[in-house]
Amino acid sequence: MLFDSLPSTTDEFRNWSWAQIQPYFNDLEARSLDATTVERWLANWTHLDNLINESRMRLWIRTTTHTNDEDGVNRFHAYLSDIVEPVEVANQQLKEKLLASSLTPKGMEIPLRDMRTEAALFRAENVPLATQESKLNTDYDQILGSQTVMWEGEEITLLQLRTVYYKPDRDLREKAWRLEIERRAADTPVLNTLWKDMLKLRQQIATNAGFADYRAYMWQERKRFDYSPEDCTVFHDAVAEVVVPAAERIYERRRLRLGLDSLKPWDLLVDTSGQPALHPFSTVEELEIHSEAIFQQVDPQLGTYFGIMRREGLLDLDNRKNKAPGGYQTDLRLVKRPFIFMNAVSTHEDVQTMIHEGGHAFHCFESGKLPYSQQLEITMEVAELASMSMEMLAAPYLTRDLGGFYTPSEAARARIEHLEEIITLLAYIAVVDAYQHWVYTHIEEAADPENCDEQWVSLWKRFMKGIDYTGLDEALLVRWRRQSHIFQDPFYYIDYGLAQLGALQVWENALQDQPKAVRQYLDALALGSTARLKDVFAAAGATFAFDAATFGRLIGLIERTLEELETQVH
């Protein structure tokens, strides 16, 4: 049989041409489909799809770990143009074939629903436009990945500079902060040009697919069947009513403890107790060792999963020049393994990122047991439920006596930092999401970055109260340009907010019965994309809700816990 000749790894396959790959699609297209043949057909399609998907991911990972690798970038771009584009067309034909068969294999009900949506959205003329968009996203990574400054005679990345914001010397913090803003602002012209190109391209994609605006197109593309754009307004209003006042209380406590007349943006990370900043680890190896111990405490299976990642070289955690900013986890579908990328500089934020991305990785391990690749196309709300719930489930195990990073007092400080950040981040999520709604329903206005600046500042003032930006207007304008989701993942930010509400409910359950909450969490991860969004939340023990009453209950729980933790800090 033809499919017996497919490679078992991507080492050789990554170099295959479309002429070598096409016969396999032709074979699947030519076969008859019925109840007796569909499972084998899906298994063959899955193996081919996994080879292609993992080849693409390994090439992309190279572009993020070495942004100055021109050959790597060129190979990735070539793969997008020469392989991914014709594959998209071929996959579409296979989706239409399966849909036309009226067959519903076990566990494929929701994937088939998603395929119907994809079939309705598909336009051949959008395939090369998607490739162009991926290339523009790589350009964005290269711009931000090259941003360094000279600090105390040494060239360092902006993330490394961020460690200064934890220091008690306020003048030093301000100096570092202004240096960062100056460096970021230097790239505003090139980012403005990139932004205009992205908006034009995305609107063309929406127009080609028959949509009046890109938001309507993306709602279908992101398979948002359980909530609407109007529901996002409910989220924004609930944040304004419940979360913004809670965030203001956090900022006011910080201002008073620091003895300041006003709280400036360089005052947000320094410890208010006067103690040195948390220094959880000195080396990446220590980060890995203690993280594995924490995951082992949450559930032994999770510790085993993380140990596999360490042994198999599936972690790139250190911060360095010519490395893309941020952090991510991506699936290597063929080998059924996750890969974690981050930029660690030995702060508690790194610990949170590690635990967060670990949640994504465990999702990969658990859902990877499903037989078909089409069952793995999870939505971002589900993906972030996995990562944010892990942050909450791991919180009790941060102390050294349990294998973690901290003394009990330090762990209390770390948890305070995390819980306060949940509240302040929810407010920021409303800014980013509301901004993206405006951009993609006012595309002509948004093509002028000055209009974007005005809208961003307006939303910032609504949701980000308590931080004094008087005389620092340029910093606010830099802020939206450094937010990668705004450039690279339109409408991917509300997902964090919705998932956070689910994760807080998982935590609420864990306070009553931690083992049961963990079991429910793992049950939800194992569903992959075989269940509706609301049903995945329900499997995790959460209700999919984001009204003011739900916010009020959960923010109240956070604030009560913060009061308890304050008594443990000394």
Image: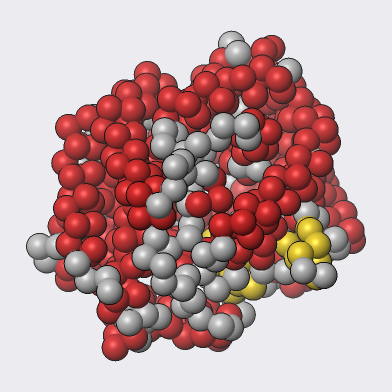
Task: Point out residue 279 in the picture as x, y percentages from the top left corner.
Answer: 49, 76
Q: Position of residue 556 (x, y in %)?
A: 18, 45
- Left or right of 447 on screen, residue 348: left
Vertical arrangement, residue 93 with respect to residue 7, above or below: above
Q: Quadrant of the N terminus?
A: bottom right
Residue at 73% across, 51% down = 179
Q: Is residue 543 above or below residue 490?
A: below
At x 62% / y 32%, what residue is drawn? 471
At 76% from the left and 25% from the top, the residue drawn is 196
Q: Residue furthest left?
A: 512
Coloration of the structure image: secondary structure
What residue is rendered at 78% in x and 54% in y?
Answer: 147
Q: Where residue 165 sits in the image (x, y, percent)? A: 57, 59
List x then y, in percent, for residue 408.
28, 79
The quadrant of the image that shows the C terminus is bottom left
Q: Please state which of residues 238 and 227 is positioned toward the viewer in this rendering.
A: 238
Query: Left of 146 or right of it: where is 242?
Result: left
Name the quadrant containing residue 381. top left
Q: From this viewpoint, is residue 360 visible?
A: yes
